[in-house]
């Protein structure tokens, strides 16, 4: 279904961003080889287009028509790879960045947009030609030097500098994006739409891409990002930390963590998990690691057996201060220190963020309205860990306790219809988790776990809707499950839990 776009009318035409190229900033494309996805400029420009079509209107492409946030993301192209070359200066809390975006046009267009807020733009090129742009409502609207045709690969290079700030999101009661804690640790927690606080991007989960990060910081600071740490290049007291995220990633999961930190390899967890496990920790935690952190290897092993193999090249957490939550950034979840210091709860949240690597990060909702596919699944994974470590009675007690607790809260929206101004409400977590339990009781353990495995296997590195999950459950169980999902996901009150037939 194609939804009509609701795009606010342009109010302010702010800048013309077509400043001269800044010769002090190197082109990241010249010094790194993007993994597999890069199309050379020569290839891009020699592509023969048999038919040239007139450009479509930019006003139809300023958003992707998400059911909660219609203006998020941009149409007309798919991003293949982002190269983020960023220098952080802790003395001024500022960044100087050059971002190269390799994309493929899907519509004829002479103008296209990116989601981006703030900063002074110093360089803007499309296919190495200086381009003009204006800013309208959190979008950067760029004039391509020539009309791009569907299938054309093109490269957009944006240089900018300034002090990044967290942004206010409609979705959450607290700011998101780029933060700095009182120890001077800078980090990004962007879900769902805070990515534009530090990067120009196509900020919607339906456009996954691979990423290269080159983060330059003064010694002895450490810079971590998503994926695999490839190398560190040191020059005159500054180090460039190179990270490759080779698996496709939704933009809301992109992160950096910079500060007086240590990258701590967990050899025991790596051996059990079968993927490199490394955590990014402040020195005192690196020296004395909390016990629950040592269980990540077993957790990865447990969920790999239950859901299918761990989907990415590495895993671990980064710990920062004064952040009262955790976020499942791909391959590198970020945890606030308060969570780490709350022993029982820390283990639960470790399980939750890990489970998101399968459900949310590898298999990703194509629309924010289906956020229960992330949070309901990660919450149910917590309960599966309880069952695994404490037995079936503990699971039953948890499930009925959560059901009763939930029934007490009046006016909760059902998990399948979360309000845009409270996307991460309790319902998408708990009612969403209970929905999976109700399904399990209805179709039995064997069909239920086969459903989870098949849903993951067929959709990894991809995007889905609720109906994709329902279809797998119906296919595996051979049952008509529309009634169950309708009442659990879209009904006004929490249904009674069916009683176990197992
Ligand atoms: N997805 C997070 C979780 O694991 C919740 C969340 C959404 C969040 N947006 C955030 C946490 C931004 C911190 C910052 O449940
Ligand atoms: Zn979650």
Image (spheres, helix red, strand yellow):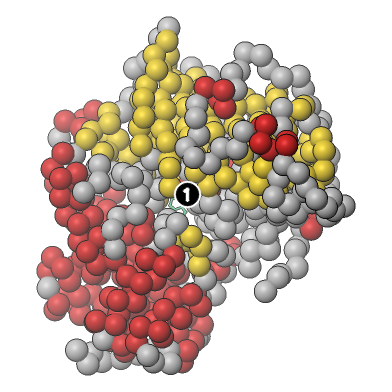
Tell me residue 321's x, y (percent): 35, 38
Q: Is residue 225 visible?
A: yes
Tell me residue 275's x, y (percent): 25, 46
Left/right placement of residue 137 relative to residue 56 reads left
Q: Quadrant of the C terminus?
A: bottom left
As drawn, 126 above or below 339: above
Tell me residue 188's x, y (percent): 47, 40
Tell me residue 98's x, y (percent): 60, 27
Label 1 sits on residue:
248
Q: Quadrant of residue 3?
A: bottom right
User: Who is closer to the viewer here, 267 or 223?
Assistant: 267
The total number of labels drawn is 1
Q: Is mark 1 within 8 Å of ligand 1?
A: no
What residue lies at 15% left-to-right and 45% top-to-bottom?
271
Left/right placement of residue 158 relative to residue 185 reads right
Q: Is residue 429 visible?
A: no
User: Who is closer to the viewer here, 39 or 231?
Assistant: 39
What residue lies at 24% left-to-right and 81% top-to-bottom?
446
Residue farthest right in this picture: 54
Q: Quadrant of residue 99?
A: top right
């Amino acid at each position: 279904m194609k939804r009509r776009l609701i795009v606010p009318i342009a109010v302010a035409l702010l800048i013309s961003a077509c400043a001269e190229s800044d010769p002090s900033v190197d082109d990241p494309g010249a010094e790194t080889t993007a993994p597999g996805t890069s199309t050379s400029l020569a290839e891009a420009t020699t592509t023969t287009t048999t038919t040239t079509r007139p450009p479509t209107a930019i006003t139809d492409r300023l958003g992707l028509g998400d059911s909660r946030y219609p203006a998020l993301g941009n149409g007309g192209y798919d991003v293949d790879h982002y190269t983020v070359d960023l220098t952080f200066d802790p003395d001024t809390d500022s960044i100087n960045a050059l971002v190269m975006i390799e994309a493929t046009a899907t519509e004829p267009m002479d103008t296209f947009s990116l989601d981006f807020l703030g900063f002074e733009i110093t360089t803007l090129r499309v296919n190495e030609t200086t381009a003009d742009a204006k800013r309208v409502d959190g979008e950067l609207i760029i004039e391509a030097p020539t009309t791009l045709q569907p299938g054309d690969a093109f490269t957009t290079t944006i240089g900018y500098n300034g002090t990044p700030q967290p942004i206010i999101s409609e979705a959450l009661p607290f700011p998101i994006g780029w933060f700095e804690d009182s120890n001077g640790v800078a980090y990004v927690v962007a879900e769902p739409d805070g990515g534009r606080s530090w990067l120009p991007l196509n900020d919607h989960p339906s456009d996954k891409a691979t990423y290269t990060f080159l983060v330059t910081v003064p010694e002895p600071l450490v810079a971590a990002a998503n994926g695999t740490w490839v190398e560190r290049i040191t020059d005159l007291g500054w180090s460039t930390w190179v990270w490759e995220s080779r698996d496709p990633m939704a933009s809301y999961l992109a992160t950096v963590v910079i500060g007086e930190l240590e990258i701590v390899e967990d050899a025991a967890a790596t051996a059990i998990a079968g993927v490199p496990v490394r955590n990014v920790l402040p020195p005192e935690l690196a020296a004395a690691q909390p016990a629950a952190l040592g269980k990540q290897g077993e957790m990865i092993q447990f969920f790999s057996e239950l859901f299918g193999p761990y989907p990415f090249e590495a895993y671990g957490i980064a710990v920062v201060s004064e952040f009262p939550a955790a976020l499942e950034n791909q391959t590198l979840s970020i945890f606030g220190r308060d969570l780490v210091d709350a022993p029982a709860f820390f283990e639960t949240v470790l399980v939750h963020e890990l489970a998101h690597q399968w459900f949310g990060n590898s298999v990703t909702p194509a629309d924010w309205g289906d956020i229960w596919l992330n949070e309901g699944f990660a919450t149910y994974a917590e309960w599966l860990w309880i069952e695994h470590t404490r037995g079936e009675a503990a699971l039953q007690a948890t499930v009925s306790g959560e059901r009763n607790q939930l029934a007490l809260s009046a006016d909760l929206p059902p998990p399948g219809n979360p309000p845009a101004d409270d996307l991460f409400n309790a319902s998408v977590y708990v009612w969403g988790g209970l929905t999976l339990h109700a399904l399990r009781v209805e179709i039995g353990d064997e069909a239920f776990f086969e459903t989870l495995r098949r849903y993951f296997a067929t959709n990894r590195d991809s995007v889905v809707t609720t109906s994709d999950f329902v279809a797998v459950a119906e296919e595996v169980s051979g049952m008509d499950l529309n009634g169950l999902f309708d009442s659990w996901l879209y009904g006004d009150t929490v249904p009674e839990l069916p009683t176990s037939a197992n």
